[in-house]
């Protein structure tokens, strides 16, 4: 499980669905999509808290194996 907690206290998690893609990676789904918005843009993952509007970005890391 991948937990997310905003500085305002809003929290949710991404949980494994049991589905595995063709490369052997397990697919995550968001626990509560009323808590955050997320989208992908130019090799980064952006997460926006729906409570306070704070935005986060997770940049792509090199050498993912
Ligand atoms: Zn927040």
Image (cartoon, grey):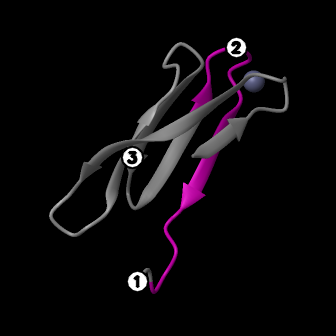
At numbered mark 2, what does the secondary structure look like: helix, strand or loop?
loop
Residue 9 % position (x, y): 83, 24
1 or 3: mark nearer the eye:
1
Residue 47 % position (x, y): 56, 37
Task: Identify the magenta region.
Answer: 48-63
Q: Residue 8 appears in which quarter of the rendering?
A: top right
User: Counting residues from the N terminus, which is met first, the one under dot 3 or under dot 2?
Assistant: 3
Vertical position of residue 61 compared to residue 47: above or below = below
Q: Quadrant of ligand 1?
A: top right
Q: For mark 1, what is the residue? A: 65
Task: Find the distance from the CA under tag 1 to the CA under tag 3.
Answer: 20 Å
Q: Residue 17 appears in which quarter of the rendering?
A: top left
Q: Is mark 2 within 8 Å of ligand 1?
A: yes
Q: For mark 3, what is the residue? A: 40
Residue 29 % position (x, y): 40, 35
* Mark 3 Cα-neighbour bin, 10 Å: few <14, some 14–19, many ≥20: few
Residue 5 % position (x, y): 75, 35
* Mark 2 Cα-neighbour bin, 10 Å: few <14, some 14–19, many ≥20: some
Residue 64 lies left or right of residue 1; in this view the side is left
Vertical position of residue 50 compared to residue 60: above or below = above
User: Counting residues from the N terminus, which is met first, the one under dot 1 or under dot 3?
Assistant: 3
Q: For mark 2, what is the residue? A: 51
């Amino acid at each position: 499980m991948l937990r997310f907690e905003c500085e305002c206290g809003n929290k949710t998690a991404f949980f494994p669905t049991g589905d595995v893609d063709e490369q052997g990676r397990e697919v995550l789904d968001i626990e509560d999509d009323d808590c955050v918005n997320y989208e992908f843009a130019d090799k980064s993952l952006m997460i926006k808290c729906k409570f306070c509007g704070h935005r986060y970005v997770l940049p792509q890391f090199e050498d993912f194996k």
